[in-house]
Amino acid sequence: MDYFKEALEGKIGVVSGAGSGQGRAVIKLLLENGAAVMAFSRSGSKLGVTHSNLTVEKADSTDISSLERVAKIVREKYGRIDFLYNNHGIFSPSTGVLDGPKAIEFFQRNVVASINTVSVFLPMIREGGSIVNVGASPSIFKHASLEYAVSKSAVEELTRKMASLLRDRNIRVNAIMPGSVDSSKDVDELKPFSFPPISGRKTVSNLEVAYVSIFLLSSLSNGINGQSIIVDGGAQ
């Protein structure tokens, strides 16, 4: 029995930050397992994926009016949604410099963007729905800037707090915390489980992240709530 397909077929959801890499990988797996997806990103990239159940829009999660425009499309097309994938974030390497204005920008992109997206789409999420935020594994903080590490660390507490607030509505909130992601190979080159041994590896593939992501988005993970799942092959 294909449990992923059984759990996702006919479900409807929104994926933000869908421009490339792991966002694209998550979308491909969702579509292959029978879900319908509204995807959006700041670039509005078409992802190189064509599917009758995929709609792609251009939107910025730091701009409420931009999100409301996409929400209106979703409402008119589907009425309700079952899941929301918050794939937000910008990265910068460590510079040794403390930069307050840059920290504000990173909190806007890595934290506030997810709060905005949940607040706009929450009225459409069905009871029993799932929200997944994308944080980052602590394994990559050593070489990251202060503003990146601190803002991505905040995603873990953001997730716990959201889960607490939405538990009575029977909406689960979890986070996935990827390590360094190698997106050089498309998901079709790696399926179903063409992964190298984890020994000595410093990266994970976009497909490894995507499998955990769709598990958390689906009812297969119904017993998991308020958790942040690290996917870095044990690099930390």
Image (tube, rainbow, N blue to C red):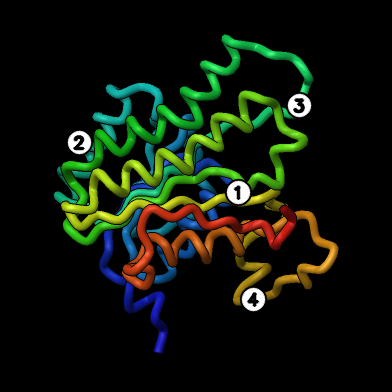
Q: CA distance from mark 1 to mark 2?
A: 27 Å
Residue 186, how many percent across, how many down?
65, 59
Q: Residue at horizontal 21%, vertical 50%?
A: 125
The spot of residue 232 in percent (x, y) is: 67, 57
Residue at disc 3, secondary structure: loop
Q: Residue 94: give its label.
A: 3
Alpha-carbon span between mark 1 and mark 3 = 22 Å
Type of amino acid under label 2: Lys
Q: Nearer the viewer, mark 3 or mark 4?
A: 3
Q: Check disc 1 and report its element: helix, strand or loop.
A: helix
| Distance between the alpha carbons at the discs numbered 3 and 4 | 34 Å
Is 203 left or right of 51, judged from the image as shown?
Answer: right
* Lower sequence index among marks 4 and 1: 1
On screen, residue 82 versus residue 175, left or right, reads left
What residue did someone put label 2 on? 72
Which quarter shows the N terminus? bottom left
User: Which residue is more in the foreground, 222 or 122?
Assistant: 222
Q: Residue at x 40, y 51 (%)?
A: 132
